[in-house]
Amino acid sequence: MVTAADIAAYFVRWPGHSFAALGHAENAAALDLRPMGVPARFFDAARHGHLVAAYAAANARAFPGALTLPGWVLADLYLLPGAIALLLDEHDTIVAAWCGVPTVVAGEVMGVSLLAEPAGRGAATIVKRLGVAMLGAHAQRGLTQWTSRSIRAHTRLGPLDLLGPAPAAHGAASESFVYRCTVTAPDPTPTDRVSPALGPALAAEAAAGRRVQLVAPGLDDAGLLVVSRA
């Protein structure tokens, strides 16, 4: 679980970093621009095209090939309905980013495109936690790949309840799964560690009605999924 103390410690370690939001100007009033006590600068996407372009480039580096973000999706589904949470350095270069898109379920957002440059500083966890708080959400639905190290960041917010396999239309459906994370939910005790190759079987169990969760760290140092089955 990411606490306010964890977030404060991050900014002590990286004093040049700051939190920001990028989106449609009319969305600013609906956001908490001081999530967990951290001030956020809001950038209107229509007036800060250079930052939109920088985000698009960072996203393309993080998600090449079939997962590359089309420009119309960035505009229509990221910037207009929600907001992109950013960590910026002292030069306003993007350090980490996460986008939360509102869903039809009150208090639940769809999280997409978590990235950090460079990885390994804990920035991905911090930007996601602040982004969820900024959007006033208590739960986050998402889709990721069984071997993605982003699972470590996701599970730091809370256990991931597996919902099932990814929709077939997804560019990497065979490698992916859908989850829900209830922020600050306690971690259950792990019951198993399995190869990501067995991930689709876990998703099938969840789709059939069994409660299956990934718990912190989600993906261990040996590359195994840390699982709890109820």
Image: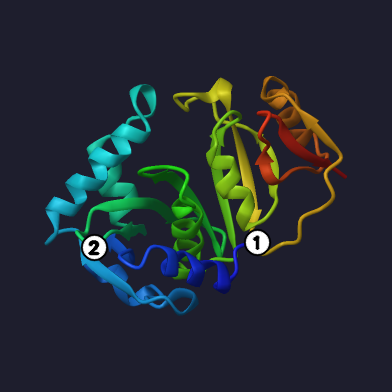
Q: Please determine whether, in this image, residue 225 is positioned above or below residue 27.
A: above
Residue 158 in the image: state x and y as whole percent.
67, 56
Q: Closer to the camera, 168 or 67?
A: 67
Q: Image check: 32 left or right of 68?
A: right
Q: In the rendered structure, which disc, 2 or 1, sits on the residue that comes first in sequence?
A: 1
Separation of residues labelled 2 and 1 (CA atoms) = 27 Å
Residue 38 in the image: state x and y as whole percent.
42, 75
What residue is drawn where x is 75% and y is 30%?
Answer: 202
Question: Which mark is on residue 48?
Answer: none
Question: Which mark is on residue 1?
Answer: 1
Residue holding disc 2: 90
What residue is drawn where x is 28% and y is 41%?
Answer: 58
Residue density around tag 1, few if under 14, some if 14–19, many if 20 or more, within 10 Å: some
Please name the amino acid that badge 2 sits on: Glu
Q: For residue 62, which quarter of the picture?
A: top left
What residue is drawn where x is 83% and y is 44%?
Answer: 190
The quadrant of the image that shows the N terminus is: bottom right
Residue furthest out toward the front: 13
Q: Image check: 198 left or right of 175?
A: right
- Numbered disc in front, either 2 or 1: 2
Please name the amino acid that badge 1 sits on: Met
What residue is drawn where x is 36% and y is 77%?
Answer: 39
Residue 160: in sight, yes or no? yes
Residue 40 in the image: state x and y as whole percent.
33, 72
Residue 69: in sight, yes or no? no
